[in-house]
Image (tube, helix red, strand yellow):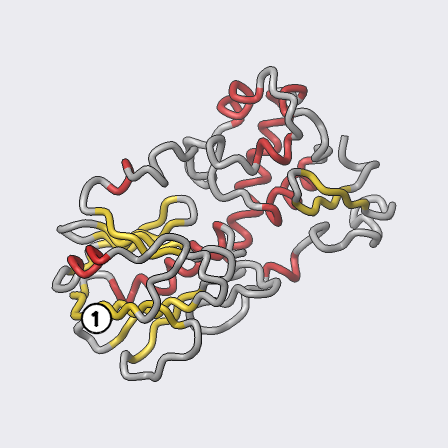
Amino acid sequence: MPELPEVEVSRQGIRPYLENQRISKIVVRDDRLRWPVPITLQDAVGCVVHEVARRAKYLLLKTDKGTIMIHLGMSGSLRVLNSDVSAEKHDHVDIVMETGLCLRLNDPRRFGSVLWEPGDVLQHKLIATLGPEPLTDDFTAQLLFERSRHRKAPVKSFLMDNHNVVGVGNIYANEALFTAGINPKRAAGNISLARYKVLVDDVKDVLAKAIKQGGTTLKDFTQTDGKPGYFVQELQVYGKAGKPCPKCGELLQSLKIGQRNTVFCSDCQR
């Protein structure tokens, strides 16, 4: 599943081709995505895309009339190509610009979405209750500390809750908790402010590095130019259960937390 770094890399990739360009046509080949593609999406035709933004894992194409909201779901990917290039299987939606280029969504599993919000997109029901962005000053140790008090849930689940902070998906939660030396099973409410300060810094660091490397390619994600993300080469623990810990040499362990695979070192993470 594309996580926040992959979505941010996609945003950076499509931005130069869409911003300040007018939408000439929207082609919907299959509207059966996670939510049906609304007919009102056609209201964006004729509009200029003033900004390509991101909130959590939603890409936001902002115009004067409203905002196109794109979510890549489990297997979605975006390409910028000439609009006369023949569509392939699972190419569900094209947003065609007057330049002749189009933004094409391919989504084999159809868990992604393309929605239209004519009002304030930040008040949309899918976005309004989300937590802070992890790479901003709004994401702080004090915030996590206060929200975690009396919480018995594992810190990994707490960190992956989008109401606490957005975009820290399974890969990056594993990596940040390892770097911070925090056992993912530990109750969120039993972690001190000092340790949350370390964790927040490590979350920011691992996400920033992943974005710089172009994301993490595991199964489905590729960048808008078709090149893979290279952060997979930097992973320390994710997908490496049974291998030696890169810090102490003990074998990395794995278990399920919240139905997600979790890899950690029982010696280094307390």
Is 1 or 228 nearer to us in this picture? 1
> Residue 93, percent across and down?
32, 67
User: Residue visible at 22% across and 40% down?
Assistant: 120
**What residue is shown with label 1?**
97
Residue lying at 67% horizontally and 54% vertically, measured from the top left: 235
Residue at the right extreme? 250
Q: How many marks?
A: 1
Residue sitting at 58 percent across and 31 percent down?
A: 158
Callout 1: few (<14), some (14-19), or many (20+) C-alpha neighbours within 10 Å? many
Residue 238 lies, with reference to residue 255, above or below; the image says below
**What residue is drawn where x is 66% and y is 45%?**
260
Locate residue 17: give its quadrant.
Answer: bottom left
- Looking at the image, residue 6 sits to the left or right of residue 230; the answer is left
The answer to whether residue 90 is left or right of residue 48 is: right
Q: Is residue 246 left or right of residue 238?
A: right
**In-front residue for pair 239/208:** 239
Amino acid at the residue labelled 1: Met
Q: Nearer the viewer, residue 36 or 96?
A: 36
Q: Position of residue 15 (x, y in %)?
A: 31, 61
Q: Position of residue 243 (x, y in %)?
A: 83, 54
Position of the C terminus by quadrant: top right
Give x and y (percent) for residue 86: 35, 84
User: Where is 131 relative to 233, above or below?
Assistant: above
SS type, badge 1: strand
Q: Residue 70's image quarter?
A: bottom left
Q: Name, please, the residue furthest toward the top.
A: 150
* The N terminus lies in quadrant: bottom right
